[in-house]
Image: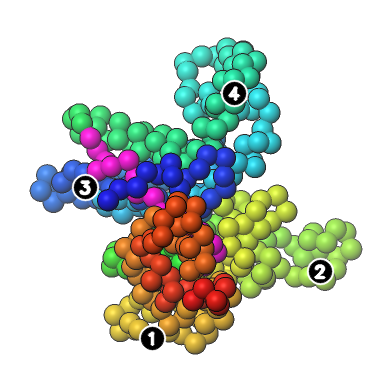
Amino acid sequence: MGFPRRRYVHEGEEGVYHCISRCVRRAFLCGFDQLTGRDFSHRKQLIVDRLKHLASIFAIEVCAYAVLWNHFHTILRIRPDIVASWSDLEVATRWLKLFPKRLSPEETAALAAALASCPERIAELRKRLCSLSWFMGRLNEFIARAANKEDDVKGRFWESRFKCQALLDEAATAACMVYVDLNLVRAGLAATPEESDFTSIQERIRSWQEETMMKASVPEGSLHGDTGENTNPVTASDSAINDSDSWLCPIASESQRRGILQMTALEYFDLVDRSGRIIRSDKRGAIDVDLAPILLRIGANPEAWLETISRFESKFFLAAGMLSSLRSFADRLGRRWLKGVGIARTVFASATPSLA
């Protein structure tokens, strides 16, 4: 039975959500259709470009994504604190960027100023610019219109608006991010995370590699002024290296941006890589002993990690998280039971032992 999204995705509240959109047609969304001989792979980049565009407008951060042949995953964090810091003029300017009009820069600026002078309208737009439904609506509508125009057809493109799971704590967020980033590996479409095209993990790794190479190319003396002394050399293993130049939400917190996990980018890469290795058929069920400390730190059960990252989407319904988080979530909804409570007891460590 469906459950109204408005009951658990509240406007004006920060939250992290796993969203899935699936194509309704027999034809491939983003792959090669052997029946018609048409290749729709170019739509993968269209989805990524649209995600990047919307992330630059909304107060919603993209934490992870993966684009497959007939569906795509996104993990989004709503940031009402960011939209609250915008001026009325910035809200108006961002809204006009979302729905651009064929006007000159001067005319657009004048329209934005006029819009900013309407407090009630600005208050409404401020809510929309940190709304999960508005973000996903503008994403899916854009893709559907482009695909319908390309296919010269009309009608429904997506099987529903979108599926949504609330990620209630860091354990659920980390597990779901690994699940999304390893989707292509798990489907046998890529051998390694860095070879997983159109995924956030590939983009993060490439961004990290470019940053590392750029820092390595800087002369030692220039890193610390004119003294000629390099008291803290930058190396590829430096934990301070992050994905600050990426449009994605950073893994670790930075001076100007709040991260999504309490680990460095390199630790997350290692977590994804080791998890990807145990997904292989010849390694199934084997948990690398070196992986356990990271899993325990984020509140995950090492023995159940493989099952968690392999079947995350089907294990939970409305929300995912530790047992205590799910029980609090159920209380908010006025429900005595919630699908996923049983599996949460197994796959995540309990933050409150008495609840186990």
Which residue carries the number 2 mark?
A: 230
- Work out how far the residue at label 1 is from the one at label 4, CA to CA, in angstroms: 54 Å
Q: Earlier in the sequence, mark 1 or mark 3?
A: 3
In this rendering, the label closer to the viewer, 2 or 3: 3
Give left or right: position of 67 versus 238: left
Q: Earlier in the sequence, mark 1 or mark 4?
A: 4
Q: Earlier in the sequence, mark 2 or mark 3?
A: 3
Residue 58, above or below 262: above
In this rendering, the label closer to the viewer, 4 or 3: 4
Which residue carries the number 4 mark?
A: 122
Which residue carries the number 1 mark?
A: 286
Task: Please say if the residues under marks 2 and 1 sit with CB atoms less than 8 Å apart.
Answer: no
Q: Earlier in the sequence, mark 2 or mark 1?
A: 2
**Residue sitting nearer the eye, 181 or 240:** 181
Q: State which region is magenta.
A: 156-171
Q: In the rendering, at what x and y percent does residue 276 appear?
A: 40, 73
